[in-house]
Amino acid sequence: AIDLYEQSSGAFDEKSTLIRATQFFLLPVAIALQEDLIHVYTRIANIRYDPAIQKISPAATESKFALSFLLRFLDGLYSLIINFVLVLITGQVLSIFLNFAALGFLQSIDDIAFHLAANGYLGDDMEDLCVIVKTSSLPRRVGDTFTNALDSLLFMTTFLVMLIIYVYVVMQDMKDDSS
């Protein structure tokens, strides 16, 4: 990422039509690839905290439930911002896709750690905790039409914000080209 920034001088402008089209079509893909962000959107819309979970895991309080969503949301949002900026400053189509692949790998490291723990490579206690995490479930949120559509609404809001920023960057580029 640092090399790309230095090569582009951090510039969002002077991109070809092919690059701009690629960037545009990758906006929803960039969001969908943010596994942590999508996980939070889906869970907020579809599950609710239930104190009965404390019978299985006494430390699973509602505040920790909320904190886990907040931290996972921030992690996903941070990754999305990095991905989005890299998409905007990258000047070659292949490099854009390579950035997606590299960031996807970095985002999967925590999943790899969980799989190692679940398979017993990090000790029996960690393996036992992973079994509890895998088998624990929370009740589905039953709500009105708004609640049922909340995950889609959050996804579309994120896309709209990215689209507004993208259009602003492109308009600034066009304005600079005409000057």
Image (cartoon, rainbow, N blue to C red):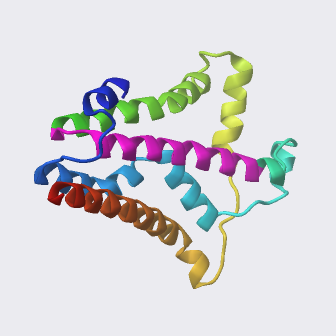
Magenta run includes residue 127: no
Q: In this image, 149 relative to 60: left or right?
A: left
Secondary structure, magenta segment, majority class: helix
x and y, in percent, of residue 35 in the image: 47, 46
Say which quadrant the N terminus sits in: top left
Residue 87 percent coordinates (x, y): 30, 44
Q: Dividing the image into 4 quarters, which one contains the C terminus? A: bottom left
Residue in view at x 72 percent, y 31 percent: 129
Q: Is residue 79 above or below residue 109?
A: below
Q: Residue at left 44%, top 64%?
A: 161
Q: Where residue 114 sits: x, y (%)? A: 58, 29
Q: Say left or right for 89 vs 103.
A: left
Figure quadrant of residue 100: top left
Which quarter of the picture shows residue 17? bottom left
Residue in the picture at 66% in, 44% down? 71
Position of residue 159 measured from the top left corner of the image (x, y, whole percent):
41, 63
Q: What residue is at 24 percent from the left and 48 percent from the top? A: 13
Residue 106, visible in the rendered structure: yes
Is 51 positioned to the left or the right of 168 in the image?
right
Asked if residue 8 is positioned above or below residue 141 in the image, the reply reads above
Residues drawn in magenta: 65-93
**164 or 23: nearer the viewer:** 164
Residue 25 visible in this rendered orientation of the protein = no
**Residue 134 vs residue 18, the one in the foreground:** 18
Is 83 included in the stretch rendered in magenta?
yes
Q: Quadrant of residue 115?
A: top right
Q: Is residue 39 left or right of residue 166?
A: right
Q: Which residue lies most toward the bottom here?
A: 145
